[in-house]
Image: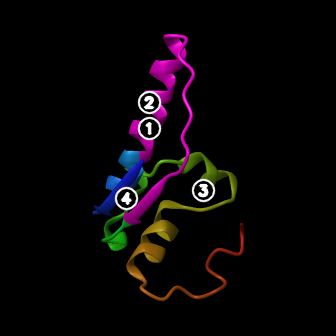
Amino acid sequence: MIAKHLCANATDLAVQAVQHAFKVAAEKGQNTKIASVVLAPCCHPQIQWDSYTNVEFLERHGFLPSELEAAALNPDPHPNLFTNL
């Protein structure tokens, strides 16, 4: 899968589309493999909590929607911003 210039939440939507394709293939008994994934996101300041691909991961590590927004808006985040990971 190659996806270039994925604005805002399009990177997350692309990952979700691949996940859906795998689910459909598995339901049909098809074997699928991905050799590589290349994503070139842009517009990271427009990332939104509601369409983020793995909100459960962020919640499990104690992140709040406001923290994702702060990280998205900061072009040079403080190195301790993601210390929960």
Within 10 Å of disc 4 (Cα), the crowding (few <14, some 14-19, many 20+) is some
Per the rendering, the mark at residue 20 is: 2
Give the quarter of the image for residue 6: bottom left
Q: Secondary structure at mark 2?
A: helix
Within 10 Å of disc 1 (Cα), the crowding (few <14, some 14-19, many 20+) is few
Instruction: Tell me which amino acid carries mark 1.
Output: Val
Per the rendering, the mark at residue 58 is: 3
Tag 1 near tag 2, CB within 8 Å: yes
Q: Residue at x 33, y 70 (%)?
A: 42
Q: Position of residue 22 (x, y in %)?
A: 50, 28
Earlier in the chain: of badge 2 and badge 3, it is 2
Per the rendering, the mark at residue 37 is: none
Q: Which residues are magenta?
A: 15-40
Instruction: Tell me which amino acid carries mark 4.
Output: Gln
Q: Secondary structure at mark 1?
A: helix
Give the quarter of the image for residue 73: bottom left
* Residue found at the far front of this picture: 35
Q: Residue at x 67, y 83 (%)?
A: 80
Per the rendering, the mark at residue 48 is: 4
Task: Say if the magenta span includes residue 29.
Answer: yes
Q: In the depicted view, which residue is nearer to us: 58 or 40?
A: 40
